[in-house]
Image: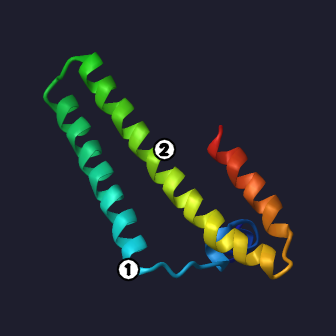
Amino acid sequence: MDNNGSEEKCMKECCCCERKKERTADEYKKLINRLNRIEGQIRGIKGMIEKDAYCTDILVQSAAVSAAMNAFNRELLANHIRTCVAEDIRKGNDEVIDDLVATLQKLMK
């Protein structure tokens, strides 16, 4: 498949390709700060591996990263429900409920 075909497929299947969400400066700052902390934790784990750290020490840090990502997802999901989903429902777009269910199923894998 050529690039145009894959781009077309992405536009049809990927919600992030066609929809956008304007965030307040505060929302943006909070999300970016969380991601920066997580990025730092990942770099720390990489450093631990490079320094031959003990397996369980690395696993503990890895679990902390997983917990941080879960917290990020919870915050983003809650904001999504309060804003995007609620607004679409008020506009009569009940299709957003199916989208939310699909998103929740992906998050719970």
> Residue 29 appears at what percent x and percent y?
34, 71
Q: How many neighbours does mark 1 have within 10 angstroms: few (below 14), some (14-19), or many (20 or more)? A: few
* Quadrant showing the N terminus: bottom right
Identify which amino acid the numbered label 1 is placed on: Ala
Instruction: Identify which residue is drawn at 35% across, 57% down.
Output: 35
On residue 25, which mark appears? Answer: 1
Q: Foreground: 39 or 24?
A: 24
* Quadrant showing the C terminus: top right
Residue 33 position by quadrant: bottom left
Marks counted in the figure total: 2
Q: Foreground: 59 or 13?
A: 59
On residue 65, which mark appears? Answer: none
Which secondary structure lies at badge 2?
helix
Query: Measured along the vertical axis of the image, is residue 102 above or below residue 25?
Result: above
Identify which amino acid the numbered label 2 is placed on: Asn
> Residue 34 appears at what percent x and percent y?
34, 56
Instruction: Identify which residue is drawn at 68% across, 66% down.
Output: 14
Residue farthest to the left, as pictured: 51
Does the rendering let one see residue 2?
no
Pointer 2 residue: 70
